[in-house]
Amino acid sequence: MPGEMTKASDESYARHVLHSDPIRRYTILALVWKQGQASPVHAHHTWCAYGVVAGELLEARFEYDAEAQGASATGSHPRKKGDGSCGQAGLAQIHRIQNVRRETAISVHVYGVPASELATGVNNVLPLATTAIA
């Protein structure tokens, strides 16, 4: 992977477009995660897949609670180099990815949208479910 595609950001995990299909079927990204950086809790507007190519990430899983209108945690899984995950569009796969290690982690993601739609066509950010206090 070219060096500029592995540059981290201090503000948030960095996203670098590696390839965008010329007929708009998919985009491949390198995401670079410094310690403590995390995605929001989200589902996807499109199909997606990712694999860890350096370091280790923690993927927290959630399920949608329609009554509470938010995501409830169901567990987490460490994702080491060579591990990955995939999912369809919709609320069946809700997750948050985070780097909890000291070393920078890099993951490669493929989304079923062209690069021009990455900002709005990928993540469906969800609130956490809250329980009313009686």
Image (cartoon, rainbow, N blue to C red):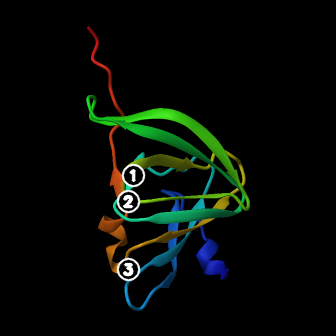
Residue at image mark 3 = 114
Residue at image mark 1 = 43
Q: Nearer the viewer, residue 13 or 17?
A: 17
Is label 1 in contact with label 2 (beta carbons under 8 Å)?
yes
Q: CA distance from mark 3 to mark 2?
A: 15 Å
Is label 3 in contact with label 2 (beta carbons under 8 Å)?
no
Badge 1 crowding class, 10 Å Cα cut-off, few under 14, some 14 to 19, many 20 or more, is: many
Query: Which quadrant of the structure image shows residue 127?
Result: top left
Q: Nearer the viewer, residue 16 or 80?
A: 80
Q: Nearer the viewer, residue 130 or 68?
A: 68
For marks 1 and 2, give the one nearer the viewer: 2
At horizontal 73% and vertical 59% (from top left) the residue drawn is 81
Q: Secondary structure at mark 3?
A: loop
Mark 3 or mark 1, which has the lower sequence index?
1
> What label sits on residue 96 in the rendered view?
none
Image x and y of residue 30, in percent: 57, 71
The amino acid pointed to by label 1 is Ala
Mark 1 or mark 2, which has the lower sequence index?
1
Is label 3 in contact with label 1 (beta carbons under 8 Å)?
no
Is 120 drawn above or below residue 113 in the view shown?
Answer: above
Q: Secondary structure at mark 2?
A: loop
Locate the N terminus and report the quarter of the image it occupies.
Answer: bottom right
Mark 3 or mark 2, which has the lower sequence index?
2
The amino acid pointed to by label 2 is Ala
Badge 2 crowding class, 10 Å Cα cut-off, few under 14, some 14 to 19, many 20 or more, is: some
Image x and y of residue 110, in percent: 51, 71
Image x and y of residue 20, in percent: 46, 84
Horizontal placement of 134 versus 107: left or right? left
Q: CA distance from mark 3 to mark 1?
A: 18 Å
Image x and y of residue 117, in percent: 32, 74
Is 85 drawn above or below residue 116 in the view shown?
Answer: above
> What label sits on residue 89 in the rendered view?
2
